[in-house]
Image (tube, grey):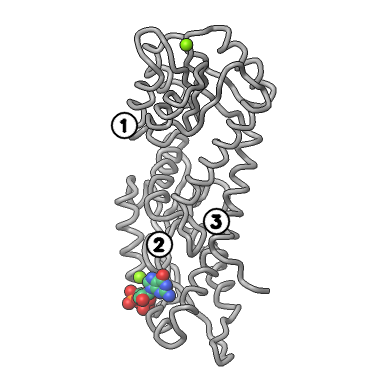
């Protein structure tokens, strides 16, 4: 079968993510000085899995943002003491809220207001009176665009696994979780063997195909709470929740057998295989922080390379 384009894989992920956001409760923070508007929005959106946190005092916005961590924000233009436009500008200048979807709901529909709303950093704009179908469609649209945007920003486009920065963040959360619940956690660094020679011998495009298959195999083998990331050119990292070094070592050896059992085909049809080496480090045994675990796993990887490659060492 033809290999699907990496971008297609990323989009498939995004679709899955969007489907998940559909089934999960979404939090919308609505700021409007008109209680009636807030009640109407709450009533309209509740049956669609959107929980509305209603704020009628703009002074409480920061507190409510911190508390409710909304997926989307809805602002009114005219409010006593401030305007939604000012509020929007301030949110956009705060790195925590710079990308959250912001919709305006306003009684004004003149050109100047529309211009100012978008200039303040709004994503979309709705006029009162509320048309329920339009309200829901615009909220859904923003949530889906945002999920897609975030997915693309967090994913390595070649392999479909998390990129370095997003996998590091996810690993940090995983370490905290393991610490809190006293669970085992093992970090593995996986590096393809003699990969420079693969590129030199078979070309960069085939090298890319090898990396893509590595991404596929990792995504198949690890799921749920595990974290998979691409940290460098041909270096991957996996955080395995609830796994000891020994469990992880066995799992990676199975993966190595699987990865080396299916040959790649060179342009002239010549089959070739690629192996990998890995080092594993367990939280509590080799260190506590991601940095310490990474250092320990890297040292183990170095030993695996020295010992002749195609192996997994603690
Ligand atoms: P070792 O077994 O010691 O790991 O040897 P190696 O050749 O795998 O290691 P080295 O670090 O010398 O080479 C890594 C190579 O990976 C060099 C670089 O050209 C290649 N590489 C890095 N990123 C990519 C990529 O995105 N695509 C392709 N095709 N090659 C890449
Ligand atoms: Mg108002
Ligand atoms: Mg290598
Ligand atoms: Mg390397």
- Of circles 1 and 2, which is in front? 1
Q: List the residue tagged with mark 3.
A: 10
Residue 124 in the image: x percent, y percent? 51, 31
Closer to viewer: mark 3 or mark 1: 1
Name the residue beneath numbered marker 1.
93
Most foreground residue, 248 or 275 = 275
In the picture provided, is 243 more to the left or to the right than 200? right
| Residue at mark 2: C-beta within 8 A of ligand 4 | no
Q: Residues within 10 Å of mark 3 (few under 14, many from 20)?
A: many
Distance between mark 3 and mark 2 Cα atoms: 23 Å
Residue 189 tag number: 2
Picture quarter containing residue 169? Answer: top left
Q: Residue at x 56, y 91 (%)?
A: 270
Q: Residues within 10 Å of mark 1 (few under 14, many from 20)?
A: few
Quadrant of image for the C terminus: bottom left
Decide: marks 3, 2 in contact (CB < 8 A)? no
- Helix, strand or loop at mark 2: strand
- Mark 3, secondary structure of its residue: helix
* Rendering quarter of residue 142: top right
Question: What is the CA distance from the residue labelled 3 to the residue labelled 1?
Answer: 29 Å
Query: 226 or 11, which lies in front?
Result: 11
Check whether the beta carbons of the residues at disc 1 and disc 2 lie within 8 A of each other: no
């Amino acid at each position: 079968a033809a290999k699907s384009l990496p971008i297609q894989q990323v989009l498939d992920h995004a679709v899955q993510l969007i489907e998940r956001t559909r089934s999960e409760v979404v939090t919308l923070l609505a700021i409007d000085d008109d209680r009636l508007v807030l009640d109407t929005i709450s009533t309209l959106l509740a049956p669609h899995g959107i929980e509305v946190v209603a704020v009628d005092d703009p002074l409480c916005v920061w507190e409510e943002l911190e508390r409710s961590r909304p997926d989307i924000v809805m602002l009114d233009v005219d409010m006593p003491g401030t305007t939604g436009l000012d509020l929007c500008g301030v949110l956009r200048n705060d790195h925590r809220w710079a990308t959250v979807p912001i919709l305006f709901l306003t009684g004004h529909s003149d050109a100047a207001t529309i211009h100012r709303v978008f200039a303040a950093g709004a994503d979309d704009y709705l006029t009162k009176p509320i048309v329920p179908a339009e309200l829901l469609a615009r909220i859904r649209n923003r949530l889906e665009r945002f999920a897609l945007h975030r997915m693309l920003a967090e994913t390595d486009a070649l392999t479909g696994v998390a990129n370095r920065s997003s996998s590091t963040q996810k690993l940090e959360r995983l370490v905290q979780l393991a610490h809190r619940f006293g669970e085992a956690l093992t970090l593995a660094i996986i590096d393809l063997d003699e990969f420079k020679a693969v590129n030199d011998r078979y070309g960069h495009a085939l090298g890319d195909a090898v990396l893509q298959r590595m991404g596929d195999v990792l995504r198949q083998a690890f799921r749920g709470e595990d974290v998979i990331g691409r940290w460098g050119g041909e270096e991957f990292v996996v955080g395995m929740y609830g796994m000891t070094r020994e469990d992880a070592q066995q799992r990676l050896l199975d993966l190595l057998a699987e990865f080396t059992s299916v040959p790649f085909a060179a342009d002239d049809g010549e089959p070739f295989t690629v192996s990998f080496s890995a080092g594993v480090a367990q939280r509590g045994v080799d260190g506590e922080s991601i940095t310490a675990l990474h250092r320990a796993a890297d040292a183990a990887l170095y030993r695996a390379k020295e010992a002749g490659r195609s192996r997994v060492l603690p």
